[in-house]
Each structure stands twice: as C-alpha cells, then as structure tokens.
Image (cartoon, rainbow, N blue to C red):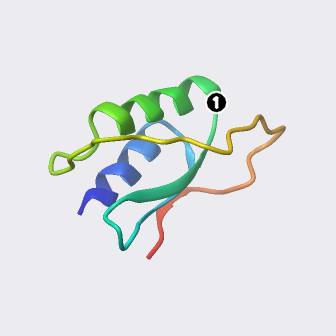
Amino acid sequence: MTILYTESEGQRLGLVGWVKNTHGGTVVGQVQGPAQQVEEMKVWLSKEGSPSSRITKANFSNQRNIEKLELRGFSTRF
C-alpha cells in the first residue's frame, strides 16, 4: 500500500500530518514541520515515493508558515 511508505517517510523526517489515498488513485494530505524537512518530503513525494508508485505529477498547494504545529503525529486516514 503506497500510503504506508508515505506515512513512514513523514515519520522518519519528524513531520506531523496525514495522508490519504483517493478514489482517483492519487494521494492527498497535510504535512507540517520544519521547512527543511517539509522540502525533503516534497522532493521524496515528487521523485521517489513508494516502490510501487508511478509518479507523473506532484502538486503542492495551500502552503503557509505557521507559528506552531497544528497536528500531532503522522498518520494514514481512510
């Protein structure tokens, strides 16, 4: 399952947030943490992903700076 690799990578980078597979075969989510780790996650999502993923496009939107984390842990939503 692609999502578990994404969750694992978020945890490895010390990020908080969530990810979810969509019915359309894409992954959506929210990631929070230090800017450098968030950038690393974006690169991973754009270029590597899970071993079985086929990445054709990565779109990141609604990016903003926050004073403190609004989420806890990194999880998969179903």
Q: Residue furthest right?
A: 67
User: If the image is split into quadrants, where does the C terminus sit?
Assistant: bottom left
Residue pictured at 63% horizontal, 38% vertical: 33
Residue pictured at 75% horizontal, 53% vertical: 70
Q: Residue furthest top?
A: 36
Task: Give the residue type at disc 1.
Answer: Pro
Q: Is residue 75 above or below residue 57?
A: below
Q: Is residue 24 above or below residue 38?
A: below
Task: Kindly tell me whether residue 41 is visible in this rendering.
Answer: yes
> In terms of depth relative to the viewer, which is nearer, 41 or 16?
41
Q: Is residue 35 left or right of residue 43?
A: right
Q: Is residue 15 left or right of residue 19?
A: right
| Disc 1 packing (10 Å; few <14; some 14–19; many ≥20) | some
Q: Position of residue 51 (x, y in %)?
A: 16, 45
Residue pictured at 20% horizontal, 47% vertical: 54
Task: Kindly tell me whether residue 17 is visible in this rendering.
Answer: no
Q: Is residue 54 above or below residue 4?
A: above
User: If the image is split into quadrants, where does the N terminus sit?
Assistant: bottom left
Q: Which residue is mark 1?
A: 34
Count of numbered marks: 1
Q: Position of residue 76 (x, y in %)?
A: 44, 65
Q: Position of residue 9 (x, y in %)?
A: 38, 43
> In terms of depth relative to the viewer, which is nearer, 53 or 37?
53
Q: Position of residue 17 (x, y in %)?
A: 57, 54
Element carrying mark 1: loop
